[in-house]
Image (cartoon, grey):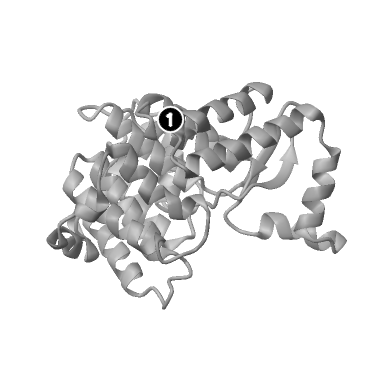
Amino acid sequence: MRLPSLLLVSTTANALFVAAPRRSTHLRSSADDGGQSLEGLESEYWNSLSSTEKTILAKSRAGGEYLKLGQLEDALACYDVAQDLSGNDRYEWHRGLALFYLGREGDAAADLLANAARFEARFDEPATEERIFAAAAAMRSAPAAPPRVAESPLRESRPVLRAARDLFFAGGGDAPTMAWKLDELKAACRSRGLKVSGRKAELVARLADAAAADAGGGDAVARAFDSLRTLCAAATAGDPLRRRLFGHFYAGLYHEAGGDETRAAAHIALAHRRAGEEAADDLTVKLPQIHADARGWVLGDVPPADLARAETFQ
């Protein structure tokens, strides 16, 4: 889960592009070149902005603050102003979160996928968080026949997010068919380490064979939960990588999308407990409570037996 601290990265002709990339490499290259601190670069950049660009950034930041407080309508209103002023060509994935928690799942899925495409095109890194939330939104918007959300063709290096991705895509996605676009089939092959050459029928067959092999080696969802269990159990003291927080949150998101609110609430409660161990004031530690409030859950009322089962990802 990417932190929401806003770091100025680049602009386009029509839009201020603000993002907090997963790794600091995007920022190190610019900060190290001139020997200038990140704060100095941000101050210098701020002074170079037009009044409209400053309004965009101010509204984006205000939206983030409202979102952390769970004031979803206010957050969305701020994000909408920022989007309108930027010509709707702006990376602002937290707008999709506001839509998701306001119950506008169809709009949320579309918005999150658009932001995923922007992020991946500009940073060449997988927008795994955006795609996971988009998949959850799609599953909630049409439980009987959710619209398909494609996973990223880019390699995800973060272990917890790899496992969370597999919950929603390797195990929960629909099977590839000839109705898929060629580039979607190639992306699916690439993400599984398969060859991407050949006609559509060959790619579909290749993916079907891989799925059959997976089934022979055990259920993909079960393996993803096994990975989360192992990663959380191995988390070091203090859990500096927030593996327990992320692991339980995404497990809860998956169970909720599948209609199991009992398991979902237990995992979100454990994520909330882990978040309470930190003094940080970022969206990552606020999200479990935002999620619970949006669903009307009282996390303190989750039965101990449910929490114990969730601890082991059962």
| Rendering coords of residue 1 (x, y %) | 47, 52
Give the residue drawn at x 68%, y 37%. Answer: 17
| Rendering coords of residue 256 (x, y %) | 25, 42
Instruction: Give residue 303's quadrant in the image.
Output: bottom left
183 left or right of 260? right
Instruction: Give residue 142's quadrant in the image.
Output: top left
Residue, far bottom: 237
- Please, what is the three-letter code of the amino acid marked with disc 1? Leu
| The C terminus lies in quadrant | bottom left
Q: Is residue 234 visible?
A: yes
**Residue placed most toward the observer, 182 or 95:** 95
Residue 30, compared with residue 173, is above or below; it is below
272 left or right of 154? left
Give the residue drawn at x 52%, y 33%. Answer: 75
**Residue placed most toward the observer, 128 or 186:** 128
- Label tally: 1
**Residue placed most toward the observer, 71 or 251:** 71
Give the residue drawn at x 28%, y 32%. Answer: 140
Residue 135, compared with residue 37, is above or below; it is above
Please tell me how crowded label 1 is: few (under 14), some (14-19), or many (20+) other residues with Cα within 10 Å: many
Q: Is residue 206 visible?
A: no
Residue underneath mark 1: 99
| Rendering coords of residue 177 (x, y %) | 31, 31
Residue 78, compared with residue 238, is above or below; it is above
SS for tag 1? helix
Give the residue drawn at x 85%, y 64%. Answer: 35
| Rendering coords of residue 80 (x, y %) | 57, 25
280 left or right of 298? right
Residue, far left: 305
Residue 205, compared with residue 157, is above or below; it is above
